[in-house]
Amino acid sequence: MSITFTLNGELRRLPAETPPAMTLLDWLRAAGLTGTKEGCAEGDCGACTVVIEAPDGARAPVNACLMTLGQAHGLALRSVEGLSAPDGAPHPVQAAMLAAEATQCGFCTPGIVMSLYAHARMGGDAHEALAGNLCRCTGYRPILDAMAALPVAEDTAPLCPATDVTAFGPPEHRFFLPRSLDETLRLRRDHPGAWILAGGTDLGLQFSEHRENPGSIICLRDVAELRGMTAGPEGLSVGAAEPYAALLDHMAHDADFAAFAGLLRRLGSRQIRALGTLGGNLGTASPIGDALPPLLALGARVSLAGPDGARDVAVEDFLLGYRRNALRADEVIARVFIPRPTPGAIFAAEKLSRRHDQDISAIGLAVLLERDGDVITHARIAHGGCGPMAARAPEAEAVLEGAAFTEAQARAAGDALARAITPMDDLRGTAEYRRVAARNLMLRLYWRAARPDAAAEIMALPTPHAPRFISP
């Protein structure tokens, strides 16, 4: 049984002994397709971007450095070598980049070209499309010019290979792609040491950087019960293996979750969101998981499936400590239920990082304030990046409950939050910076609510004639 996928329109059936945990990037380069580059091996620079093509013409850029060959099984993929016409003529995206003089050293260019290739079909904000691609030579202005000149994407009907294979790899390194929850739980029972792989945007670093090759992997991508979303008046039920891209698409059109959607746009890049999942964010229990503070603030719950049935756990009870959660050895995360904010409530989800897009949080803060008139009746405040795990801040909540939401109360809650958190010094910021930032984020929340017309956050200089360089 072999890993099978379509690459650049050609069916590829790999030898049975191929390690399924090998990254797609390593395989591409070993196969001579060296247009796809390795820059960071962390899904940060975008030099390794390739595109998944769906039968309906949809395109999703992904980081080949984080995607295993097992995850490529059954998909139609395109690398930069597959863009040119049969006669060798450049693709319109490549022609637009050339015409705009949007490349210099060329190392990052193949990944940027692939992001533009996906963008021509996906549309949306150009800056968001480039958030996962770092350019250190040309800069982004000529690349944006090339994007503005892109033609409408042509219709394509990629061939996804039909395959019923759900297990492959040599005996010492098995990779499973179960189709049902029952099959998943059986595999969990029979392979107790198996790694559980959702999107792999965090776990994938074990393959790309640390070169680990576990004895067995259970990939949840095709488990029907772990996919899809159901929206209702009480909230949103999200499959644990549903990619962030689909969650963002839904939340962007649901006013109750507008603030959550704003945070999701900054969770990684399009490449990361095409693979990453809520279930993965919860499963890794990272203290800097972007989605965890808003889940805590909204009172989200996790459905855990095991051989004895499902059990329902609040997110705040599911997170136990640094990289620790309440998942039992025979369970998987099945779904996440995200309650809607009550009518009239204030909900905000904030993130501070060195770069606005595609960066790890220095601090995350999410706040839900339920009100009766001007009085706060219930407060839920959750933070990330300020301790061993994402957690609520009951000390700050107590300051706000029963009081009017004034600037003074917001400052007092910020002070209580700064005293309660236990941040550390690291490359993303000092502990003192995080305490000051926590105070300021509470104040920003007040101004966002009290003065929505005011600039609570400045993203760019207001004048289009700002000088390019400032003399010392």
Image (spheres, helix red, strand yellow):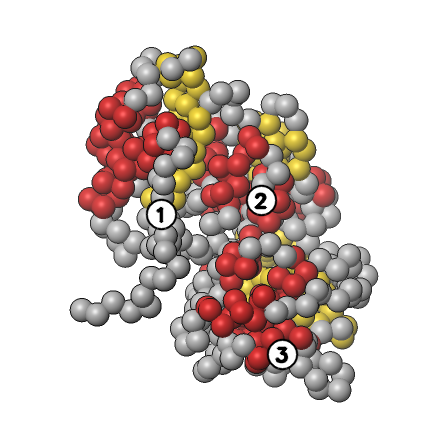
> Where residue 273 sits in the image (x, y, percent)?
55, 52
Residue 30 at least partly seen: no
Residue at point 36%, 44% (across, down): 457
Asked whether the beta carbons under mark 1 and mark 2 sit within 8 Å of each other, the answer is no
Question: Which of 176 and 402 lies nearest the eye of the viewer?
Answer: 402
Q: Earlier in the sequence, mark 1 or mark 2?
A: 2
Residue at point 53%, 41% (across, down): 261
Asked if 450 appears above or below 290 in the picture, the reply is above
Q: Quadrant of the C terminus?
A: bottom left
Residue tagged 2: 248
Q: Amino acid at mark 2?
A: Leu
Q: Is 369 on the left-hand or right-hand side of 203?
A: left
Residue 458, which numbered label?
1
Q: Is 217 on the left-hand or right-hand side of 430?
A: right
> Where residue 240 sits in the image (x, y, percent)?
60, 41
Residue tagged 3: 95
Q: Amino acid at mark 1?
A: Ile
